[in-house]
Image (cartoon, rainbow, N blue to C red):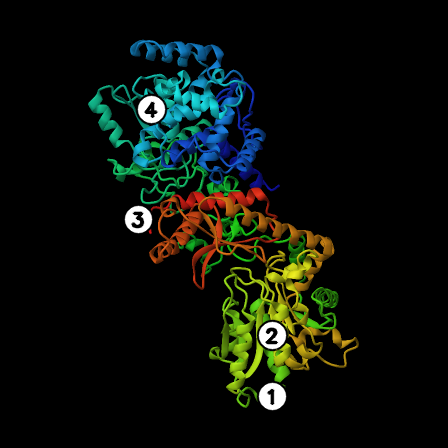
């Protein structure tokens, strides 16, 4: 590990202790792990000197987002996500809380509290609370306060954070329509706090909960009292309220006294002065909880000058109060019961548009004697630890203009910094949450092959410059031809599926009119190309580039599931023949781009044979099904095609680009494309010139793409590829089954042939409405809005599209890599649902 990497690792671990574990003031940071949050052990063993950072961050997320969400602490969290989060907490792994909903976090916190031996109050404490709640109001408050202040400090801090969060939720229940009043919260969380009210001391049955609510049980009354009297009764003492204010950034009014945060000297004592003090409080005058925690380590991070106009994407205390006084001086304060934007993220996202390097002169002078600020670039380097699960970080277009400038040379250090900026803001296609295209992560063996291929920097056109690579290409092509059932055929690696379509059109035209190679198209009849309405757009580009003209493309209707209607195809061919036009090629599709539909290849082959028309199968996406013994029957009839295109760089995960164009008839490819350049393809070479494959390609210089695929196949074999294909389709079927049973989701088609799962998410405010034209017009806007929220929050990158009569819907396309599991599918759907419920009709 280099010195720079070691320094960044230690700084990242230090800041991650601030952000996700907050560290202990009496100990040095441990740079290679976070604090562990053990379940089922006494609270003093979990907290030790302070609340563990991961637990603190979960509570802070609830404090900021739960007031906006319905039924938090009442609705159950996602079971798979709960297990994963509990595992991360107990093992001390770095966790990105953006990936977990407030429902999951609330359920995990309830489970954590239930697992504390004897309960958070202890058996004796619970009995004292049961006694205190029966006292007169004035004595009741004093008794409860006396008990709370007798608990260990760490317990007091945990309770003040939890009940402060409950208070914010209850205060906004009516305004936000969440339904989580103090009574509802009391019923939902009482079994987690009071173990003596639960029969087995561990779990609360539904009968227990119903008994609490129906009989206005003692435990529920205590919880409601603690929530309602949180600030009115001064239950937790000033130090705990200052701790709550400092950590959450909220401003409290406890018994008519303002508590903003810990501050030395303290705020004015007179009420009028306190109100003025609170109103002018801003980020430049008050440290946030993150700054305070950074100071514990002796690091002075430059967090001043945060622009109010930008959405805060980092610390919870950095959200401005709407309409608050003094907002222009930086970030405003957060009133105790304010509703915050649910997009607020607790993971650090340090973008130049958000964090301004410059500070005011007063700030500079006040900090002239402090230790140097960590640079923005170092903070960005640290940020990669906190964002390890994201597919992207949203990039304003002008953010990297300085880094992208190439007008003058830079030092190696500056170049490294710019490259890291590029990496930081590039889309991470190897992440599970990248579902935007028909390609995703790369096969690790293929990536190794790509690195070697780039290192050799040779071209595929002749045997003399690429002897082994030429043999490898021939071997791979022969193997793939055999898989597709045309063992006597030929093929070439092309730059992509679009160029493969061009190859097919050239081959079809040359087969029908060989003279086109010398005389051109002016003496030829009008040639017609047939393709389905759901086929890839490259067929239009091919018709344009090769002189057919886009008017000579006959588009054939498809079924609702996206398959070409073969009777319509035959009728169209007959019409063109009656018009004295020449049908030149039928472009069938095995795996359409959006719906993943596979045409009836066998039936289309029969029609093509009947009328003597060239049949091409665009299997760029669905061709990978041929790798599975269980699934290859879906491509029945592809062995009758004249040409086939397949892109291993899509579903199979070969590094871009890796595409094959295959022909049934050997030799035709060379005759249609050769030009016999004498300086390159001499026929009197000392070796067998049949290995000089470059003349059958439209390219001269050609990358050794076959090597990447060969390394993959050599490592995995046919059986390994088959297992990957089967698993990918199994996960797609699981997604399909899950969508059917999940409220708010609706499938576009109920049957899939490729791992494309297409669906709508319907927000709650639309579900009971009549589905007329206006409803669908609104849905057409909902899907892009969900995509926007998913992208800007770095939750998920997923494609959406309209197709024919279907309005905008999502396409979840699965690939071999990264290997998707069931919990990943559930996380994807959870992200879509959560962002879908953030939408309001007025925003559309």
- Determine the secondary structure under disc 1: helix
The residue beneath circle 3 is 842
- Quadrant of residue 126 in the image? top left
Q: Nearer the viewer, residue 549 or 221?
A: 221
The tag earlier along the polypeptide, 3 or 2, is 2
Taking the image as shown, residue 752 lies to the left or right of residue 166, namely right
Image coordinates of residue 162 in percent, x first then y, are 41, 25
Give the CA separation, mark 2 to mark 4. 73 Å
Give the CA separation, mark 3 to mark 2. 50 Å
- Residue at 47% over, 44% down: 831
Q: Is residue 746 above or below residue 538?
A: above
- Determine the secondary structure under disc 3: helix
Which numbered marker is on residue 503?
Answer: 2
Of circles 2 and 1, the one toward us is 2
The residue beneath circle 1 is 518
Image coordinates of residue 29 in percent, x first then y, are 53, 28
Image coordinates of residue 504 in percent, x first then y, are 60, 75
The tag earlier along the polypeptide, 3 or 1, is 1
Give the CA separation, mark 4 to mark 3. 41 Å
Q: Nearer the viewer, residue 368 or 291?
A: 291
Q: Residues within 10 Å of mark 1 (few under 14, many from 20)?
A: few
The tag earlier along the polypeptide, 4 or 3, is 4
Image coordinates of residue 460 in percent, x first then y, are 68, 69
Farthest left residue in view: 272
């Amino acid at each position: 590990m280099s010195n720079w990497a070691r320094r960044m690792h230690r700084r990242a671990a230090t800041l991650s202790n601030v952000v996700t574990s907050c560290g202990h003031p009496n100990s040095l940071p441990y740079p290679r792990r976070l604090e562990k949050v053990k379940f089922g052990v006494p609270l003093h063993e979990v907290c030790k000197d302070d609340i563990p950072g991961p637990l603190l961050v979960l509570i802070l997320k609830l404090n900021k987002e739960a007031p906006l969400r319905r039924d938090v602490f009442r609705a159950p969290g996602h079971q798979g996500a709960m297990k994963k989060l509990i595992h991360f907490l107990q093992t001390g792994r770095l966790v990105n809380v953006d990936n977990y909903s407030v429902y999951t976090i609330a359920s995990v916190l309830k489970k954590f509290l239930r697992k504390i031996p004897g309960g958070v109050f202890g058996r004796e404490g619970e009995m004292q609370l049961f006694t205190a709640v029966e006292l007169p109001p004035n004595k009741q408050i004093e008794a409860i306060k006396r008990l709370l202040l007798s608990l260990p400090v760490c317990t007091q801090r945990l309770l003040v954070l939890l009940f402060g969060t409950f208070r914010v939720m209850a205060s906004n229940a009516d305004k936000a329509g969440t339904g989580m009043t103090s009574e509802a919260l009391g019923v939902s969380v009482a079994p987690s706090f009071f173990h003596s009210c639960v029969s087995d001391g561990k779990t609360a049955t539904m009968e227990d909960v119903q008994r609490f609510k129906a009989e206005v049980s003692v435990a529920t009354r205590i919880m409601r009292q603690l929530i309602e009297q949180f600030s009115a009764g001064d239950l937790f003492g000033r130090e705990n309220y200052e701790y709550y204010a400092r950590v959450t950034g909220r401003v409290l009014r406890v018994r008519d006294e303002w508590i903003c945060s810990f501050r030395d000297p303290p705020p004015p004592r007179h009420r009028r002065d306190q109100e003025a003090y609170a109103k002018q409080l801003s980020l430049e005058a008050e440290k946030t909880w993150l700054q305070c925690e950074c100071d514990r380590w002796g690091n002075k991070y430059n967090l001043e000058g945060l622009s109010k106009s930008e959405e805060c994407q980092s610390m919870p205390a950095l959200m401005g109060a709407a309409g608050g006084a003094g907002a222009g001086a930086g970030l405003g304060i957060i009133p105790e019961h304010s509703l915050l934007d649910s997009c607020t993220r607790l993971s650090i996202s340090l973008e130049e548009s958000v964090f301004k390097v410059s500070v005011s002169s007063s700030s500079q002078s006040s900090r002239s004697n402090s230790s140097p600020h960590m640079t923005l670039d170092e903070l960005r380097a640290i940020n990669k630890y906190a964002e390890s699960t994201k597919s992207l970080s949203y990039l304003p277009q002008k953010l990297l203009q300085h880094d992208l400038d190439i007008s003058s040379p830079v030092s190696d250090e500056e170049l490294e910094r710019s490259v890291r900026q590029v990496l930081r803001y590039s889309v991470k296609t190897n992440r599970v949450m990248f579902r935007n295209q028909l390609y995703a992560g790369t096969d690790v063996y293929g990536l190794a092959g790509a690195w070697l291929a780039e290192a050799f920097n040779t071209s595929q056109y002749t045997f003399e410059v690429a002897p082994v690579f030429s043999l490898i290409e021939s071997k791979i092509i022969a193997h793939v031809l055999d898989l597709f059932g045309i063992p006597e055929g030929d093929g070439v690696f092309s730059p992509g599926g679009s160029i493969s379509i061009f190859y097919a059109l050239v081959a079809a035209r040359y087969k029908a009119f060989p003279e086109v190679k010398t005389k051109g198209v002016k003496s030829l009849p009008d040639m017609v190309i047939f393709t389905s309405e759901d086929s890839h757009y490259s067929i239009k580009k091919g018709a344009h580039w090769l002189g057919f003209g886009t008017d000579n493309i006959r588009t054939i209707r498809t079924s609702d599931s996206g398959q070409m209607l073969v009777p319509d195809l035959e009728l169209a061919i007959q019409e063109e023949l009656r018009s004295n036009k020449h049908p030149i090629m039928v472009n069938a599709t095995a795996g359409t781009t959006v719906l993943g539909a596979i045409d009836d290849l066998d039936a289309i082959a029969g029609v093509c044979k009947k009328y003597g028309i060239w049949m091409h199968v665009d299997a760029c996406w669905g061709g990978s099904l041929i790798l599975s013994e269980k699934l290859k029957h879906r491509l029945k009839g592809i062995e009758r095609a004249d040409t086939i295109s397949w892109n291993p760089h899509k579903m199979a995960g070969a590094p871009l680009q890796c595409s094959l164009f295959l022909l049934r008839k050997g030799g035709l490819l060379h005759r249609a494309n050769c030009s016999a350049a004498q300086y390159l393809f001499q026929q009197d070479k000392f070796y067998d010139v049949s290995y000089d494959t470059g003349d059958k390609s439209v390219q001269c210089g050609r990358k050794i793409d076959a090597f990447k695929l060969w390394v993959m196949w050599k490592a995995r074999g046919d059986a390994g590829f088959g297992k990957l294909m089967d698993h990918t389709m199994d996960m797609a079927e699981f997604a399909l089954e899950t969508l059917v049973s999940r409220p708010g989701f609706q499938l576009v088609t109920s049957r899939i042939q490729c791992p494309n799962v297409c669906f709508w998410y319907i927000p709650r405010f639309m579900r009971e409405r009549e589905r007329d034209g206006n409803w669908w017009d609104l849905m057409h806007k909902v899907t892009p809005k969900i995509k926007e929220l998913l992208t800007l929050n770095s939750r998920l990158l997923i494609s959406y599209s309209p197709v024919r009569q279907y309005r905008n819907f999502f396409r979840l396309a699965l690939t071999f890599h990264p290997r998707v599991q069931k919990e990943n599918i559930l996380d994807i759907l959870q992200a879509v649902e959560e962002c879908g419920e953030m939408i309001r009709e007025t925003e559309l």
